[in-house]
Image (spheres, rainbow, N blue to C red):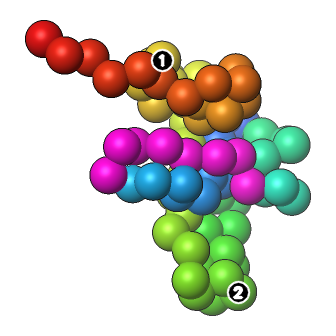
Amino acid sequence: MIEQPREWIIQRAIDEWRNLWENWPGYSETLMTREEVMVALKACDERWTAYQFRGHNVKQATPEHTAPHAAGSYPKPRWN
C-alpha cells in the first residue's frame, strides 16, 4: 500500500466573494492526507453549520489561494 502525501489543511471562508480564507484552528497545524481531510471536512460541516469550509492543498497552492491574513494583510484590488 502506497502512503498518501500529507499536504492538506482545512480552511474557513472569511469572504468567499473575494476568495479570502483562514486556516481553521485544530485542522491546520498538522498536514493531513486527502482521505483524512475529507473526513475532517465532514466533521467541520456537521459541527459548525454556519461556516463554509474547504480542504486546501498547501503543496499545490498558488499565491492567490493562500490565506491572506497569515501574511498580515489582505490583497489589494487590481484595477486592470
The answer to whether residue 79 is left or right of residue 49 is left
Quarter occupied by the N terminus: top right
The answer to whether residue 80 is left or right of residue 19 is left
Q: Name the kind of residue labelled 1 in the image.
A: Pro
Q: Position of residue 42 (x, y in %)?
A: 59, 77
Q: Name the kind of residue labelled 2 in the image.
A: Arg
Residue closest to the eye, 75 or 55 = 75
Eyeballing the image, is 25 above or below 70?
Answer: below
Q: Residues within 10 Å of mark 1 (few under 14, many from 20)?
A: few
Q: Which residue is mark 1?
A: 63
Q: Which residue is mark 2?
A: 47
Instruction: State the extent of the magenta-drawn residues as a range.
Output: 17-24
Q: Position of residue 18 (x, y in %)?
A: 36, 43
Disc 1 is placed on an element classified as helix
Eyeballing the image, is 16 above or below 31?
Answer: below
Residue 7 magenta: no
Residue at 69% across, 59% down: 36
Locate residue 74: give its quadrant: top right
Residue at 42% across, 20% down: 76
Q: Residues within 10 Å of mark 2 (few under 14, many from 20)?
A: few
